[in-house]
Amino acid sequence: MKKILITGGAGFIGSHVVRLFVNKYPDYHIYNLDKLTYAGNLLNLTDVESKPNYTFIKGDIVDGDLMLKLFKEHQFDGVIHLAAESHVDRSIENPMEFVMTNVVGTVNLLNAAKAIWKDQWEGKRFYHVSTDEVYGALGHEGFFTEETAYDPHSPYSASKAGSDHFVRAYHDTYGLPTIISNCSNNYGPNQFPEKLIPLFLNNIRNNKPLPVYGKGENVRDWLYVIDHAAAIDVIFHKGPDGETYNIGGHNEWKNIDLIKVMIKVMDKKLGREPGSSEKLITYVTDRAGHDLRYAIDSSKLQNELGWKPSLQFEEGIEKTIDWYFNNEEWLDSTTSGDYQKYYDQMYGHR
Ligand code: NAD
Ligand code: TYD
């Protein structure tokens, strides 16, 4: 039985990866290691928690001794590393937390894998999940490829870039069997309502203002989270050591246009006058260092490993909105308590 460590499995993307691996690979044992920060939510995994091939471990990747102890105890064959601080606005408020988890935490995992695998790389794999934000910002033309030079602008993207560099360095220096993917913005069920889509969905539902940064002209390339999990599965199993793959769905939206699509779909579902929720749109001070445009060229992944996105955006956004409407308990529980304090601190003054 293969033992796979998935870090950050209680978060948004991690929970979809855990579910996919637990259900698809009954001959793997999946260990989900998560600190359960504000973004970690075990409610995301109630359907897999009692499966015999699943174990949850509460732990902090910043604790290097603990990482070594866990590797010794469980002798993991593979790692899929998603644990991270992931929200740009929080990174602007508190960069050090991003350095600790994203850089130091990643190096702790690399050290533990290196110490326990001891050059016996056969059948071993260290998969690091990263973001397209490491490439910086595009103008109105062009796409990020795997060859694009790193040019991060936010403390979040700088910390992810740092972790990517360490992963490559451990491959090039010690021969660790690593692989990296850089994905565009994800959306779908279980995303913590601080990111654009679930935050605005919840605010439209509750008739609260929609804080659009700047003029809403920034462009993001959106991928349905289940398609990201499927790409991770393909890359984990088929990608050669030392490689990098970009993941994206060629699905670019200007923020303001995407918000209007959400409003259109939600007004209909809520029985409101079409477009009436547009009155909630509130233009606020732009995010510092706000990258204009992200867009991914994923042709390497599509051509070499045969992955492609399964959903068109219109279908994905409709499914996403339906999920949040059908899981209002999840939404209400994540928007209470600490999250409310955060909301007031970040947006309350506007
Ligand atoms: P998330 O914030 O929803 O989840 C992060 C998870 O990591 C949480 O469960 C949290 O409890 C856990 N965690 C945080 N610090 C930890 C620590 N010190 N020790 C152990 N666990 C810790 O993030 P997400 O959106 O699911 O992103 C997952 C990964 O994918 C991240 O590495 C992120 O950089 C990357 N990524 C995200 C996107 C996106 O659009 N969300 C796009 C591309 C890449
Ligand atoms: P976000 O979901 O934070 O993802 P990222 O910054 O990692 O791309 O933001 C997506 C886009 O939406 C980004 O251009 C910033 C913008 N945005 C707003 O206009 N208002 C908001 O309240 C948030 C959270 C984001």
Image: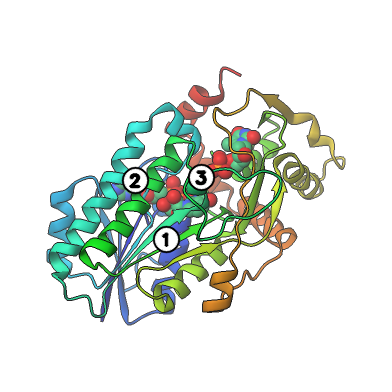
Identify the secondary structure beneath mark 3. loop
Taking the spot 31% from the left edge, 45% from the top edge, the residue there is 103
Foreground label between 1 and 2: 2
Q: From the top left corner, tell me how far across and down residue 87 is, in percent.
A: 47, 40
Inter-mark Cα distance, 1 to 2: 27 Å
Residue 231 vs residue 311, the one in the foreground? 231
Identify residue for label 3. Answer: 192
Q: Which mark is residue 102?
A: 2
* The C terminus, quarter of image: top right
**x and y percent of residue 54 in the render?**
31, 69
- In the picture as drawn, the residue positioned furthest to the top comes out as 349
Secondary structure of the residue carrying tag 2 is: helix
Q: Residue at the spot x=25%, y=51% of the render? A: 107
In space, the residues marked 2 and 3 are separated at their CA atoms by: 18 Å
**Residue at the spot of label 1:** 46
Residue 173 appearing in the image: yes
Secondary-structure class at tag 1? loop
Tell me: is circle 2 under 8 Å from ligand 1.
yes
Query: Foreground: 129 or 147?
Result: 147
The reply to whether dot 1 and dot 2 touch (C-beta < 8 Å) is no
Q: Position of residue 272 (x, y in %)?
A: 83, 41
Please tell me whether residue 340 is drawn above or below residue 258 in the rendered image.
above
Q: Is mark 3 within 8 Å of ligand 1?
A: yes
Residue type beneath disc 3: Phe
- Of the numbered discs in the image, which one, if any, rests on residue 103? none
The amino acid sitting under disc 1 is Thr
Camera-near label (1 vs 3) is: 3
